[in-house]
């Protein structure tokens, strides 16, 4: 958008161009020849369009290979000021840095690079105060799970951020960049699963999945619950993996509470989701919904597993064959045997 002073009369403008630069630490360099990113970098515009605000859609030909870029726009204007007619080139401020990815599997690392650069600066700044970082983690989380920051369906509670501070940052008032980057190895994979794996984010928003909860708290919640009650959380030690804690029997033994780490082959993309896997586990009868109210008090309620998860189960068609069709692919011998029986 072009902002014009009251004593300036604009007679005409050139087409608007877009400059794309790769950011290198605290410097930047123009994209060299052979590194074309934009399918189109020039946009026709009138002065009326530009003063009102020109909508521009940028299309990228390639990814940026984990390198950070930024763009700005410019044009040449023909104008008169104080009775003097001139031409000059004007530029917009640079937009926020970005990385172009070509596959969702690149999101975790790309977002980690952008987040570290945004928090600590491209010049390799070393530390941040914890309160600033906690607010940033809260904002990044809501962006990743596509929640409105001002009206989130389920915000991160103070207890979760407090335990995160203790577990990953040792309650230090100031956080070093290297410590944050190590934390992102866990946090980034959790965000990726919440953002891209089917039903996982919805389960979290509904309170059926916990982001961060220690085993001591898990055992305290399951203590006294009926056999077959279970809860889910992200594992603290296995980055991005979901753990299931369940009550095996009604005894007071520590062995009555068991833990299972969901394996990659337990779910298979959209064909077999986490709810589908849970539906097949007959010992798991009641799922816990754990939420934190505005006062910080943790509440939990149990629901019959199938009642809570039925909306998420995959609706598979019946395997009953239609008349005139085999129930499975037959060998020649089996086909001959069927003919003899008939």
Image (tube, grey):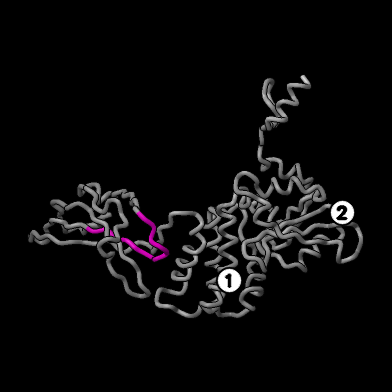
- Looking at the image, residue 124 sits to the left or right of residue 235; the answer is left
- Looking at the image, residue 169 sits to the left or right of residue 252; the answer is left
Image quarter where the C terminus lies is top right
- Measured in 3D between alpha carbons, the distance from the residue under mark 1 to the one under mark 2, in whole angstroms, is 35 Å
Q: Position of residue 100 (x, y in %)?
A: 40, 58
The answer to whether residue 318 shows anywhere in this view is no
> Residue 71 in magenta?
yes
- Looking at the image, residue 191 sits to the left or right of residue 52; the answer is right
SS of the residue under disc 1 = helix
Above or below residue 327? Residue 216 is below
- Looking at the image, residue 92 sits to the left or right of residue 86; the answer is right
Q: Which residue is mark 2?
A: 226
Residue nearest the viewer, comparing 218 with 30: 30
Task: Residue at 77%, 59% (x, y): give it.
Answer: 245
> Residue 234 in magenta?
no
Q: Which residues are magenta?
A: 62-74
Q: Which residue reaches farthest left?
A: 84
Task: Residue at 74%, 58% (x, y): give it.
Answer: 244
Task: Residue at 33%, 49% (x, y): give it.
Answer: 57
Residue nearest the viewer, comparing 149 with 17: 17
N-terminal-most mark, 1 or 2: 1
Task: Residue at 75%, 46% (x, y): give it.
Answer: 280
Q: Which residue is mark 1?
A: 183
Q: Position of residue 148 (x, y in %)?
A: 53, 53
Disc number for residue 272 = none
Residue nearest the viewer, comparing 82 with 209: 209
């Amino acid at each position: 958008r072009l902002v014009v002073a009251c004593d300036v009369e604009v007679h005409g403008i050139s087409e608007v161009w877009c400059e794309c630069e790769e950011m290198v630490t605290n410097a930047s360099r123009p994209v060299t020849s052979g590194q074309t990113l934009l399918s189109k970098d020039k946009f026709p515009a009138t002065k009326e369009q530009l003063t009102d605000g020109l909508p521009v859609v940028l299309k990228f030909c390639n990814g940026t290979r984990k390198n950070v870029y930024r763009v700005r726009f410019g044009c040449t204007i023909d104008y008169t000021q104080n009775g003097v007619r001139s031409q000059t080139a004007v530029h917009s401020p640079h937009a926020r840095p970005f990385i172009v990815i070509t596959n969702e599997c690149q999101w975790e690392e790309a977002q980690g690079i952008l987040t570290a650069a945004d928090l600590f600066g491209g010049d390799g700044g070393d530390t941040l105060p914890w309160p600033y970082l906690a607010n940033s983690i809260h904002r990044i989380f809501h962006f990743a799970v596509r929640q409105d920051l001002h009206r989130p369906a389920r915000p991160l509670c103070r207890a979760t951020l407090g335990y995160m501070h203790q577990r990953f940052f040792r309650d230090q008032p100031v956080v070093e960049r290297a410590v944050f980057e190590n934390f992102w190895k866990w946090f980034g994979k959790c965000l990726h699963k919440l953002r891209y794996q089917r039903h996982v984010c919805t389960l979290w928003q509904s309170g059926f999945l916990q982001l961060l909860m220690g085993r001591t708290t898990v055992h305290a919640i399951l203590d006294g619950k009926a056999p077959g009650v279970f809860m889910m959380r992200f594992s603290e030690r296995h980055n991005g993996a979901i753990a299931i804690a369940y009550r095996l029997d009604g005894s007071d033994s520590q062995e009555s509470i068991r833990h299972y780490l969901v394996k990659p082959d337990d779910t298979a993309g959209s064909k077999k989701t986490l709810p589908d896997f849970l539906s097949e586990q007959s010992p798991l009868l009641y799922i816990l919904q754990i939420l934190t109210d505005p006062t910080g008090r943790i509440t939990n309620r149990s629901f019959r597993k199938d009642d809570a998860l039925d909306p998420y189960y995959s609706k598979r068609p019946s395997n009953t064959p239609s008349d005139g069709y085999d129930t499975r692919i037959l060998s020649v011998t089996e086909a001959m045997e069927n003919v003899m029986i008939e």
